[in-house]
Amino acid sequence: MKINKVVLAYSGGLDTSIVINWLIETYGCEVIAYCADLGQEEDMKAVKKKALKTGASKAYVLDLKEEFVKDYVFPMLRANAVYEGAYLMGTSIARPLIAKKQIEIAVKEKADAVSHGATGKGNDQVRFELAFYALKPDIKVIAPWREWDLDSRESLVKYAKNHGIPVPVTKKKPYSTDPNLFHISYEGGILEDPWAEPPEDMFAMTVSPEKAPSKAMYIEVGYKNGDPVTVNGKKLSPAKLLKKLNAIAGKHGIGRLDIVENRFVGMKSRGVYETPGGTVLQAAHRAMESITLDRELLHLRDSLIPKYSELIYNGFWFSPERKALQGFMDNAQKGVTGTVRLKLYKGNTIVAGRKAPKSLYNSELATFEADNVYDQKDAEGFIKLNALRLKLQTRKK
């Protein structure tokens, strides 16, 4: 198949900078660079300029921060999604939006193919391509890492120097990063040894807990139907709310994570992450649900979190099963409205209070003091009925 025009997901980093040149050399095609601004706080004008200088015929830079938080991060947080008990999936959740906009540009530009700089070993190639095919089944996908003979970072750096392409990776930064408004990830290089502690000067969004303020800070997060809408009583847009919490939590050393995770492609990988605002929102949301969700609904929802999280991690955002689960998750959030007070202190997010206009918590029922609403004698029959099958099992033996 003849490739005339390709839309490349471009970051301005080492891999995608080389990909532009490689696509032109290999396919003799026109390359359109597309950069998604998800809050990585880079000079987007410089990124666009670099893409054009490197050989792209056109460069798109799209500000997707509000859409990213509102339509991707918040739905994930409504479900309390967490992969393998720890990872809040800041990289995973960014991929479907990047891919969606990339396909829209491909359709607009009448491109034959789309391309990305994800390696043949990682999860991102799967996430990008599952989204591409879900949105445009007939699209051609070019994955350079699965085609070219450049098999290491060293070979990429050599290729870049030979072609006059600026190299962003240096000896002072011997690892790769992927930032967005929700988090920043670090992997590769010196982090490939799971015994080696990450260097302190690596972290960009958080101070170390040891250097965090010695005085705790109290904040209040207001919720409406499962979504955070206010911080300390002030209403903020989704992106601005997350950015504010990132700054507050980062100052207090909150949100660092060092894990060895199981990639979808089958290998284990060490990743270090910073998710300051997301960590606070995860704790706040759980606290809000504790007084607003029915017990059985909460337990049923929690039983589905591992599957829901796995779908996002593995790249199935646009699958029918993820959409169906999202419907359930969102329906369960009706009434998860109120305010949570949190104490932030040296890497810890501590729930200090919660209140809701339609709280299911009833102090008259829960009290250890005398009351007139609960007959404690009723518990006897309840216990005996639940013990019946246990008695039968013992008698059977």
Image (tube, rainbow, N blue to C red):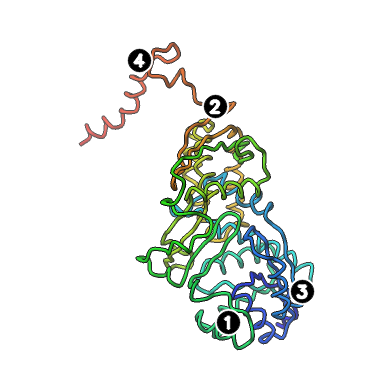
Q: The N terminus appears in which quarter of the rendering?
A: bottom right
Mark 1 residue crowding within 10 angstroms, few (<14) / some (14–19) / many (20+): few
Viewer-nearest of discs 3 and 2: 3
Q: Earlier in the sequence, mark 4 or mark 3?
A: 3
- Callout 1, which amino acid? Glu
Q: Disc 3 versus disc 2: distance between alpha carbons?
A: 54 Å
Q: Are marks 1 and 2 in contact (CB under 8 Å)?
A: no
Secondary structure beneath dot 1 equals loop
Decide: is 189 above or below 283.
below
Looking at the image, which is closer to me, 147 or 290?
Answer: 290
Where in the figure is residue 51, as x and y percent of width and height?
70, 75
- Callout 3, which amino acid? Lys
Q: Earlier in the sequence, mark 1 or mark 4?
A: 1
Decide: is 190 above or below 70.
below
Q: Residue at x 37, y 16 (%)?
A: 376
Q: The C terminus appears in which quarter of the rendering?
A: top left
Tell me the residue that label 4 is attached to: 377
Tell me the residue that label 2 is attached to: 359
Q: Earlier in the sequence, mark 2 or mark 4?
A: 2
Mark 4 residue crowding within 10 angstroms, few (<14) / some (14–19) / many (20+): few
Q: Disc 1 versus disc 4: distance between alpha carbons?
A: 73 Å
Mark 2 residue crowding within 10 angstroms, few (<14) / some (14–19) / many (20+): some
Q: Disc 4 versus disc 3: distance between alpha carbons?
A: 76 Å
- Callout 4, which amino acid? Lys
**Which label number is shown at residue 147?**
1
Tell me the residue that label 3 is attached to: 58
Q: Are marks 4 and 3 in contact (CB under 8 Å)?
A: no
